[in-house]
């Protein structure tokens, strides 16, 4: 059985009305009768979780983070599609305030926040509170805190609203306020969440997920609020490690297989399915984003409509030749079919009219900004294969999701955060001796990093290889002081690039929003 622990609730919410937060659908039950059982509460509270499924779509928080970092580039495809400037803007950090990817990422955060506010309001006014209701409200508050953390990280000063019935424009608060708010929300509600993972709470927040969020908050405290909280970050990671609910999988690839819901590293995951998450608003479809017409046939895939997401050449060059995570994450070099045979492509016919084939080899592309203008060739760039593609013919277009769940909070990240927190406290010997840190390296075919070599630079590279494309790269590069550096098709940038521009449409909707320094739009010109 797949991971439809809360899918009954999700299935009920997959209509367009699920994102209309002014509507509340209770089938034929009167509202006052709906919140009588834990099953009904679970069904209703699935609504904000379903909004998370927008994470894996084309123009989303996920794809924005990948392009803003040094992991993934999106040059123009050889078939001429995606000629809009928005992708070049993100890649080069020359962002305009009307960039669609930035707007959709903003909407992702605040749609989930609004969904949480809706559930909290309806549950709290539904009558006398009990343990089941308190747990649902706690989940919603921690989920809301997660989205505020994402928004605070990207934009700094953001709207604050925790009341569905709030009138007028929400006030805008800064990182100092949100840091304290997020910390308090998580601490106040952690004890009401499920203490351990189980089949019944897969895809929902638990106490381990709350510890994970606090670890992220404390690990980035120096950037966000100017406070070093390395010891606090280490303590939150240790709480997860000592609880013993999770362990590293035997192989790296297990975490990203077609049916990965049983991964022992999945602290918090977004479930996807070819049968339920079937629209471009809630599907996970990297096969459409990265496989071109030459590659798609290997997995019996059809209808991939671009294939322009590639590994940045300088990022690809950072992998050790022995690191198996490179071949587990990227399709590059000589391409083979699923039976291990060299993949060949047609390059035309000879004088006799007979087809001519050659081996298909994907090569890194030169550091050439003109690639954005003239497009990739058919064989340029490593392609994403981190999430295994099913080859049963079910992947046909971006209207069909993959079966792989997206693990947002993964146990390997906990181990790496713990090690980093120790290193930043000067406890390098202790950090190098963490057994699970050694295990992360050895399962990738590498020797453990010794104390003599455990520098912050090496630790960042380790994080990037272990967690590539999992949504933490921008945050990590900023924390390690590398985000403003030059990389493929991006010049070294000014400090203002540490924050994204406030989307123009959002400023139009809330006049209290002030544009971040260094960005301007037509509305700012008098």
Image (spheres, helix red, strand yellow):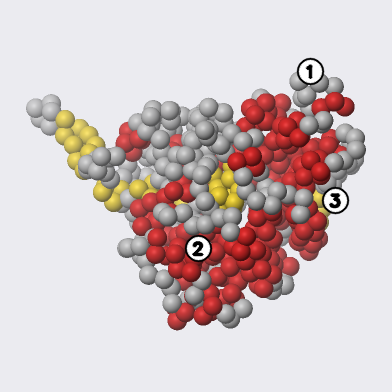
Residues 416 and 56: in front is: 416
Distance of mark 2 from mark 3, alpha carbons? 36 Å
Q: Position of residue 487 (x, y in %)?
A: 46, 62
Of the residues under marks 2 and 3, which one precedes in the sequence? Answer: 3
**CB under 8 Å between callouts 2 and 3?**
no
Q: Is there any visible trace of residue 22 in the rendered image?
A: no
Distance of mark 1 from mark 2, alpha carbons? 50 Å
Q: Is there any visible trace of residue 348 in the rendered image?
A: yes
For residue 185, what is the image quadrant? bottom right
Above or below, 155 relative to 343:
below
- Name the residue located 68 percent from the left edge and 50 percent from the top edge: 206
Q: Which residue is mark 1?
A: 28
**In-image side of 83 versus 445 (left or right):** right
Q: Secondary structure at mark 1?
A: loop
What label does residue 171 carry, if any?
Answer: 3
Residues 56 and 408: in front is: 408
Q: Position of residue 279 (x, y in %)?
A: 56, 29
Q: Secondary structure at mark 2?
A: helix
For residue 387, what is the image quadrant? top left
């Amino acid at each position: 059985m797949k991971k439809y622990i809360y899918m009954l609730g999700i299935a009920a919410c997959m209509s367009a009305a699920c994102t209309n937060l002014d509507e509340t659908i209770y089938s034929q039950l009167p509202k006052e009768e709906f919140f009588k059982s834990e099953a009904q509460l679970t069904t209703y509270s699935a609504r904000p979780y379903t909004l998370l499924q927008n994470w894996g779509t084309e123009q989303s928080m996920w794809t924005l983070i990948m392009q803003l970092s040094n992991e993934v580039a999106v040059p123009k495809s050889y078939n001429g599609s995606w000629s809009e400037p928005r992708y070049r803007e993100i890649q080069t950090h020359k962002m305009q305030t009307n960039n669609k990817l930035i707007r959709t990422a903003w909407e992702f955060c605040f749609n989930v926040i609004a969904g949480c506010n809706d559930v909290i309001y309806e549950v709290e006014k539904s009558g006398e509170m009990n343990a089941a209701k308190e747990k649902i409200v706690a989940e919603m508050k921690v989920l809301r805190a997660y989205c505020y953390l994402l928004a605070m990280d990207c934009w700094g000063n953001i709207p604050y609203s925790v009341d569905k019935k709030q009138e007028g424009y929400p006030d805008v608060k800064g990182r100092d306020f949100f840091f304290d708010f997020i910390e308090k929300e998580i601490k106040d509600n952690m004890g009401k969440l499920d203490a351990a993972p189980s089949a019944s709470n897969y895809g929902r927040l638990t106490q381990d997920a709350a510890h994970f969020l606090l670890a992220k908050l404390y690990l980035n405290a120096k950037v966000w609020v100017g406070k070093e909280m390395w010891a606090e970050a280490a303590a939150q990671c240790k709480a997860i490690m000592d609880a013993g609910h999770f362990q590293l999988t035997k192989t790296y690839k297990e975490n990203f297989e077609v049916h990965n819901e049983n991964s022992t590293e999945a602290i918090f995951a977004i479930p996807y399915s070819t049968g339920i998450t079937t629209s471009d608003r809630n599907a996970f479809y990297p096969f459409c984003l990265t496989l071109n017409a030459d590659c798609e046939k290997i997995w019996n895939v059809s209808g991939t409509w671009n294939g322009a997401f590639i590994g940045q050449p300088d990022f690809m060059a950072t992998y050790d030749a022995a690191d198996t995570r490179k071949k587990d994450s990227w399709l590059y070099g000589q391409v083979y079919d699923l039976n291990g045979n060299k993949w060949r492509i047609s390059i035309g016919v000879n004088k006799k009219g007979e087809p001519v084939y050659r081996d298909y080899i994907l090569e890194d592309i030169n550091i050439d900004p003109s690639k954005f203008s003239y497009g990739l060739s058919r064989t340029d760039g490593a392609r994403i294969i981190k999430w295994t593609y099913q080859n049963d013919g079910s992947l046909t277009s971006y209207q069909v999701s993959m079966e792989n769940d997206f693990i947002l909070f993964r146990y390997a990240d906990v181990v790496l955060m713990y090690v980093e927190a120790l290193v930043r406290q000067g406890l390098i010997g202790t950090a190098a001796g963490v057994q699970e840190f050694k295990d992360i390296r050895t399962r990738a075919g590498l020797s453990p990093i010794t104390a003599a070599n455990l520098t912050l630079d090496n630790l960042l590279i380790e994080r990037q290889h272990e967690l590539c494309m999992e949504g933490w790269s921008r945050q990590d590069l900023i924390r390690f002081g590398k985000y403003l550096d030059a990389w493929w098709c991006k010049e070294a940038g000014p400090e203002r690039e540490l924050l994204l521009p406030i989307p123009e449409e959002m400023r139009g909707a809330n006049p209290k929003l002030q544009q971040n320094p260094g960005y301007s739009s037509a509305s700012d010109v008098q």
